[in-house]
Amino acid sequence: MAAALIKLVVTAETQTTVLTKPTVEKYFYKFDTQHLDDQTGTLTIPANAFVDDQGDSVDSITPISENNGYYLLFINGALQQDGLYTVDTDEEEVVIQDAGSIEVDSPIVLVVTNFQPEANSDTTVKT
């Protein structure tokens, strides 16, 4: 009899559940020329100039989680490109470039989205 390779046969089924668990915070500001540098057109909004969803003043801007969060900035309802603004959570401010043409009292909204994902897998081995 010739030698034969004997293989172990195992089948398994895995079911994975992923929860993204986003946390969304919104900060609201009405454009005020006191925060605008007329010479450079740069708007620097301190955190305490924003209000939250309840209309309460805020002291700080929530940082995004590395690789699990992002900022969105809207001016007058229009989403802005990332390269036009920076969020500095150390200095507690939002800096917007080329802001000289924004109308006074225009709404500026910063949206902070962070994710704390959870993943669970159940594997059933069938032999």
Image (cartoon, rainbow, N blue to C red):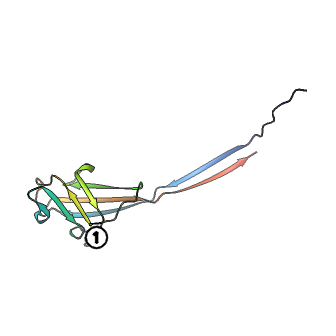
Q: How many marks?
A: 1
Rendered location of residue 75, percent (x, y): 20, 55
Outermost residue on the left side: it is: 39
Rendered location of residue 40, percent (x, y): 12, 55
Q: Viewed as shown, does residue 74 lie left or right of 68?
A: left
* Quadrant in which the C terminus appears: top right
For residue 69, above or below residue 56:
above
**Which residue corresponds to the image point at 73% horizontal and 42% vertical from the top-left?**
10
Rendered location of residue 126, percent (x, y): 73, 46
Outermost residue on the top side: it is: 2
Q: Viewed as shown, does residue 83 lie left or right of 39?
A: right
Which residue is more in the foreground, 29 or 93?
A: 93
**Which residue corresponds to the image point at 83% horizontal and 30% vertical from the top-left?**
4
Would you name the residue on which mark 1 appears?
54
Which residue is more in the foreground, 114 or 18?
A: 114
Q: Amino acid at mark 1?
A: Gln
Which residue is more in the foreground, 101 or 92?
A: 92
Q: Secondary structure at mark 1?
A: loop
Rendered location of residue 104, percent (x, y): 10, 60
**Mark 1 surroundings: few (<14), some (14-19) or many (≥20) residues within 10 A:** few
* Quadrant in which the N terminus appears: top right
**Splitting the image into 4 quarters, where does residue 99 fall?**
bottom left
Outermost residue on the right side: it is: 1
